[in-house]
Structures are given as C-alpha cells and as structure tokens.
Amino acid sequence: MNERRPPEPIDLGQVRTVPLESRPSLVAAGDFAAPVLPGPGFARLLASIPRIHAGRAFRELVEAVVAARGRGAPVILGMGAHVIKVGLAPLVIDLLERGVVTAVAMNGAGLIHDFEVARVGRSSEDVGAGLEDGSFGMADETAREVNGAATDAAACGIGLGRALGQRILRSGAPFLQLSILAACARLGLPATAHVAVGSDIVHMHPSADGAAIGAATMIDFRLFAAVLGELEGGVYLNVGSAVILPETFLKALNLARNVGRRVKDFTTANLDQIGHYRPRMNVLQRPGGRALELIGQHELLVPLLRLAVLDRLGIRESE
C-alpha cells in the first residue's frame, strides 16, 4: 500500500506582490470623519433621545467616561479594524490628544489599515475580486513595513503597536495625521497589537517572520495586562472586535488580577453592529463590573459618543 506524503509548506519566496499605490481601495481619507466640536444646539439634540433602553445606556456610558477622566482613571479603547475602515481615525486621534482615551488596543488588521491610510490615504480591498487570482492582500509596502515593525519590535524588546507607530512617525508619511498608532507613539500612550498568525494579509509575504511576530505581540499582551491592571475606576470600550480583542481582554484582565492588581470597580462597554457571543461574555458578563452594550453602526455611534463626552467635559464650539 502506497503511503501519501503530506504536502510541503508553500514557499513564500514565490509570492507575487503589487505596489500599494496602484492597488484599488474602497475607502479614502477624503471621506473620513471631521473632529468638530459640539455646538450650542447639541444639548437639545441629546435631549431628544429618550432615556429608555439604548438611550439610557448611552447616557450611562458618557457619564462613566467623564467620571473616569475626572478621577484620573483610564479609558481604554479596544478596536477592530472596521473603526478605521469607516473613517473614524480622526475622531480617535482627537480623543487621544485631548486625554479622553488613554490607551488603544487593536488587532492585526487594524495595523494594516492604519499603515495604509497613513501611507497613501486609502485602504480596504475588494476581497472577492482579488481572491479570484490570488492578488488579494499582496500590497508590497504594507507587508514590508508591518512585518518590518515586528522584526524591529522583537529585536528591541518593544511591542508591535509601538514599533509600527514609530516607523510611521519616522517615515513622514503623507497622511501621517490620520495614523492612530503614530499619534500614540507621538503622545507616549500605549498602543498594543494583538495578532493571530495566519489571520492577516501580511502573513502571506516572505517578509513575515513568525518568531518575530509572536515575540512582538506577546510583549503587547503583557503590556495590555499592565494597562488593564490600572483599570480600577475606569472604562474599557470594545468597539468592533468580535473575537480577538474580547478573548485577549479576558486573559489580560485575568493575568493582571493574578499578579495582584485590584480591578473590581470599572465599566465595560461593547459597541458593534450586531451582538456577538464573545464580546457579550468576555467583555460584559464574565469580568464583573458595570456592563453596557450599544448596538449600531460605528460611523454613527462613535461620533455621537465623542460629541456627548466632549460636551459634558465643557469642550464646545464657541457660541
């Protein structure tokens, strides 16, 4: 009986790439949100929302964020890549610069979209079209820079989020002002990246080093646990991540408690287009604390939340 030999791993040296500049993208910086301030009529708009169900939860979340910053407690944003893809990076950066959001955690796809927006002012591929001929995810610069950041991070003993943010800062990219990671690097705020090997387009390229990616994201996991170790009295927002960040949040929180950090009194919130099992269990129910959920489009919920928080903080447009 002839035994069938298992196939050899694909040789990444055979991969065909394309220039990022010439790759079609679905979203462009010209359509991104503008970080305007709440005007004199915003309070009336907010008053028109009923104080029932989501309307009540929305107000409670606003008050939790305002209270956290008032007592010097953190407001941590865990975000999926969709937040960037729907044009919300300018609003996140504004909240970082104003000291409202104090740390960011993102998945591997978030790194990719953050870099591409900074580099060419566009991102997000037509996956179906590219999948037909294998050209999906084959932008050369994206892979070289994101994978290069992993190599830098592993060599320097820093996290992947910080390493890529520093790379984008040093590059002087044309749309640098739209990079959340670069903003965190500039402001000295934690930006952690949580990567599952094989889940991101850059892992299909010869520049991908599994050992470096693993080492860099492991450092970020430990940093995330340290950030969550200071969550007492603060707020954790899970916005648009259905699997990676809810799972990572639960383990990092447990690690913080295991090494003696007191994290009992805090608020968690999940904002997404539909309700998912892991955010509901791992972010809202299992950790303890106060839990809030808002279901809706990010491109509507996040701008409204930002304006409401700034209004409560007294940061308003001049009348």
Image (spheres, helix red, strand yellow):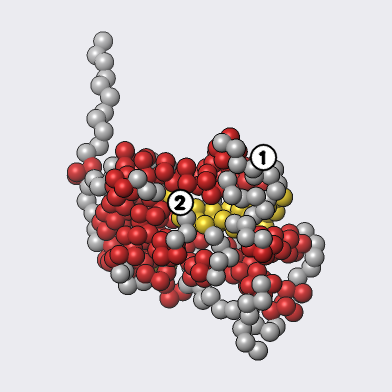
Residue nearest the viewer, comparing 156 with 206:
156
Residue name at image x 40 percent, y 71 percent:
177
Residue name at image x 66 percent, y 76 percent:
314
Q: Is residue 165 left or right of residue 245?
A: left
Q: Which residue is mark 2?
A: 192
Disc 2 residue type (three-letter)? Thr
How far apart marks 1 and 2 lie (CA) works out to 22 Å
Residue 278 image position (x, y, % from top left): 60, 43
Q: Which residue is mark 1?
A: 286
Residue name at image x 36 percent, y 40 percent:
215
Residue 197 visible in this rendered orientation of the protein: yes
Position of 2 relative to 202 (above/below):
above
Residue 260 image position (x, y, % from top left): 60, 37
Residue name at image x 69 percent, y 62 percent:
67
Residue 138 visible in this rendered orientation of the protein: no
Q: Is residue 143 left or right of residue 183?
A: left
Disc 1 residue type (three-letter)? Arg
Residue 38 image position (x, y, % from top left): 63, 79
